[in-house]
Image (tube, helix red, strand yellow):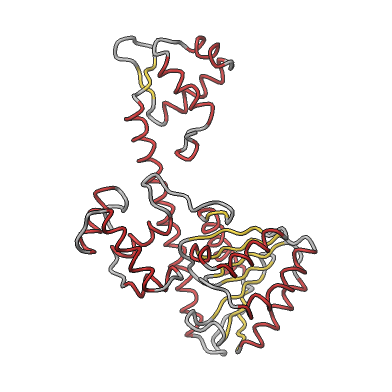
Amino acid sequence: MLTELGLDVAAEAVYRAMLSMPSANVAALARDLGASTDAVRRALDELSALALVRPSAEDPGRLWAVSPDIGMEILMARRQAQLTAQQERLDASRAAAVQLIAEYAELTPETRQPGVEQLVGLDRIRDRLVSLTHGTKDEVLSFSPDSVLTEAAIAASRPLNEELLGRGVRMRTVYLDSVRNSRPTIEHANWLAGMGGEVRTSALLPIRMLIVDRSTALIPVRSDDTAVGAAVLTGEGMLTALHALFESVWAAAQPLADAPACGADGLTAQQATIIRLLAEGHTDEAIAKRLGVSPRTARRMANELMERLSARSRFEAGARAVQRGWLPSHV
């Protein structure tokens, strides 16, 4: 199946039939596939848009299926461009979210805008979480950028989650890919999924965030110490931006039940992120913090990718990654 490369089932069937029967016309393809001629023509339109078929040079009016080696290269290049564009949109959303948090942190109580409330201290944050939970009607969205959830954090969140799911509230949670290596965290995530929650993982998460009913968001004031304080946001513009950020990350994230998927370049999302961070000059420690892994693990993964690229330095790794199409040329 080539659906992951952007080719639907019907178009793939027509493409395969054209490869095995190069001289077949629309009617013959329809008979062979047991499909209508209109369905075959729609599939040919899709194949033409993807450059997998072209007008025959020998027989005007007939379409010719390009060879699979060329066709698959076209599809993989197209998919890689889509993934790169998606990553760029995510990076732009992440930058906007970080800027929002930085601007909020600089405000004094007298200068903060309407729709922004500050909570100081972990007790007040937890009290507000309980209050929000009891008032939730439809949906809870959250980013949880922890590589490992502590027993205390799991114990504190489980009764609230159980109440929400028991009332039929939809819960969508995104964890870091690194939680797959933490048994207690993965057990909690599986418990959420078993109760009806939806859980995915992502190589990176921009911020810790909770959005309730698309009307209230809770984000930490400081990413390095989330217990210090949090901002409660209710402004429509801020909520719209944060909800768009969540949906962008959710769409690219991997369902917890699935094994980490590889893109057209053969890299998992986590590996692709490491390559990008290496090319941007981040240290092992900085990469480890972003991915939620130990510096030793980050160093090992970076070295494995450098070996795969046959690179002797991180600069060379970045250059070779661009040559292979793992990175856009402007990185």
Which residue reaches farthest right? 167
Q: Is residue 196 left or right of residue 267?
A: right
| Vertical placement of residue 319 versus 298, above or below | above
Residue drawn 42% across and 59% down?
270
Q: Nearer the viewer, residue 137 or 258?
A: 258
Q: Is residue 299 left or right of residue 258?
A: left
| Vertical placement of residue 8 versus 178, above or below | above
Task: Please tell me in which quadrant of the rendered image residue 291 appears.
Answer: bottom left
Residue drawn 44% across and 38% down?
5
Looking at the picture, how far across and down is residue 329, in whole percent? 26, 53
Number of marks: 0
Looking at the picture, how far across and down is residue 130, in whole percent? 73, 78
Residue drawn 60% across and 70% down?
184
Q: Quadrant of the C terminus?
A: bottom left
Looking at the picture, how far across and down is residue 80, in whole percent? 38, 45
Task: Please tell me in which quadrant of the rendered image residue 126 appears.
Answer: bottom right
| Vertical placement of residue 194 versus 151, above or below | above
Residue drawn 47% across and 82% down?
224
Which residue reaches farthest front? 183
| Vertical placement of residue 64 versus 112, above or below | above
Looking at the picture, how far across and down is residue 101, in whole percent? 49, 77
